[in-house]
Image: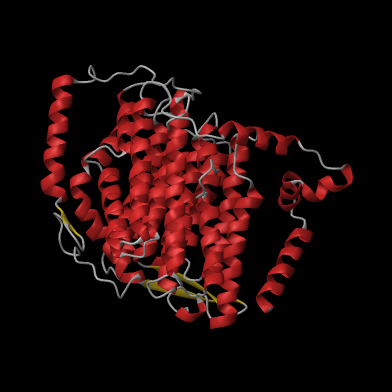
Amino acid sequence: MPSLAVLGPILIPLAAAGLVALLGFAGRNGQWIAAVGAWVSALALCAVWLPVRSSQELNLGPLGLGSSLIVRIDSVAFVFGLMVLIPAAVLLTFQSRAWREASLAMLGVTGAMAAVEAGDAVLTAIAGGATASLAVVLLDVEDARAPRPRWILLFAAWLALGWAGATLQVRGGTADYTAVPVSTLTVDVFALVALAALMASGLFPWRSWPAQVWSRPSLRAASVTVATIYPLGFYLLVRAYEMGGGHYPHAVLNAGLSTLGVLVALGAAVRAQAVETRREFLGEVIPAFGGFALMAIALGTPLGLAAALIMLATAAALVACLSLVPDRAGIASLVAIAAAAGLPPGLAFGSRVIGIEATFETADFIGLIGLAGTVAWAVWMVGAARAIGLPAGRGRPAAETFPRVALAIATLTLVAGPALALFNAALANPVQAAVMPSATTPAARDLASVVTVSTVLPAVGLFVPLLLIGAALYVWAGTAAIRSQARPVLFVMPGSSLFGRATAAIRSATVPEEYRSILSLRQLEAAAAGASPVLWLAAVVALAFAVSR
């Protein structure tokens, strides 16, 4: 395989975006080219990785200031590349888009793949910043008045990563993920990487941008934005293990991030059980998956990493599924909610089980985090049961909903539970070998069970009977036994009304006219979008000052 093939998954969507734009200027909609480009890019990624299953890279020369333009496909890039490409390909295949939206979506896919394949932290920051900018433009092109993440906040995440990469370059001579000296990944540098990951994926206990964009009238741009940007934060956390020799700089960082993950999942669960429409519940699905994945990925154990990767793969499938589910009630919505809730024996159920098991095996304080994760899951299940009987919420155009496709994806995630060990062996174990070389993976060759330190989870032997029992019950009872009436809220968070009043008071506060231009995020964002060099010059000066200290 020639080394230039590494560029295939990046150049193919870029070429597809260009062709769509050319046809658009000629008065024709070439959206089908975007869909084909996404699928071909996924096939190219598989063609590069699967035959050899070893890292392949291409050095295109110096990037500047000591950094190199290295593009690499390894196990980490392969797994996260599929998380980006497959949902994007499904969405571009079935949802109708204008040529401008299709072209921008493919440019976003190009940026995300460049960030994933980048072998250098600085290059990842550049590609990630471009992807975030394209996502905001895409959302504005679709509907400028609908909710969207602030560009300046998204870009701040990649500025933090660029700061971390520059610091690694100065202290250790390189920001290459595979060559960074372990001693240079200090607590302060890791804090920048973690901050970039949390901001990029919106991993906060409150309602962040992945849930906010799901309230838009149309989900065409929102779904592509979540598919391309949301996995990148977790990608950085995985690469941090590689830079740290399989560990984070301090155990407190693992515990802190795991605790934050539980809080993110619990926050999504609490909001989900108190929503008023089914659309609002679906908006909390991806944040909940992200919270559980952050809890598991930060444990620093092979089992936790495996659980997180399977959760993220399931979340990637559900991004496409939930985008195609109609707002009206029906079997598609029912199965999608069941898959998102973690109903056994689905992939969400199996991955959360081994994720919580990983917390118990870590022991000490982390075991308490596992108990909190169990509580969050229980609250989440209550919210899912309640969502079945809720009104649909804001309706969407019928042209962008495909109930049969959504039903097929949701059903696939449910029936794939018995293949949990196969996912572990095919996806998680190669990543573990790359980023945690000193850790042992006892289940590397077992395709029927997930072997942990303290127990064995017989995925095939346990989940197949559960699947057969569930199928038999459905055939016997159908949907007649499902009660779809609205149920009361389980509980209301104390102080929520006070928080709402405080937020309203802050938003209603006024600033003197002469200071509004420097304190308004919207005006700062408009200045950045207007290509004014002043903001960029100030950012570069601040970064140079921080690195040189």
Q: From what the image shows, is residue 64 above or below residue 471?
A: below
Q: Quadrant of residue 25?
A: top right
- In the image, 503 versus 352, the foreground residue is 503
Q: Is residue 65 visible?
A: yes
Q: From what the image shows, is residue 423 above or below residue 436?
A: above
Q: Give residue 252's position: percent from left, percent from top.
A: 45, 66
In the rendered structure, the answer to whether residue 253 lies left or right of residue 452 reads right
Q: Quadrant of residue 377?
A: top left
* Residue in view at x 27 percent, y 60 percent: 361
Q: Quadrant of residue 309?
A: bottom left
- Considering the image in quadrants, where does the C terminus appear? bottom right
In the rendered structure, the answer to whether residue 513 lies left or right of residue 143 reads right
Q: Give residue 46's position: percent from left, percent from top.
A: 32, 59
* Residue in view at x 32 percent, y 59 percent: 304
- In the image, 507 versus 135, the foreground residue is 507
Q: Give residue 75's position: percent from left, percent from top.
A: 34, 65
- Considering the image in quadrants, where does the N terminus appear? bottom left
Q: From what the image shows, is residue 467 above or below residue 473?
A: below
- In the image, 356 versus 86, the foreground residue is 356
* Residue in view at x 39 percent, y 75 percent: 245
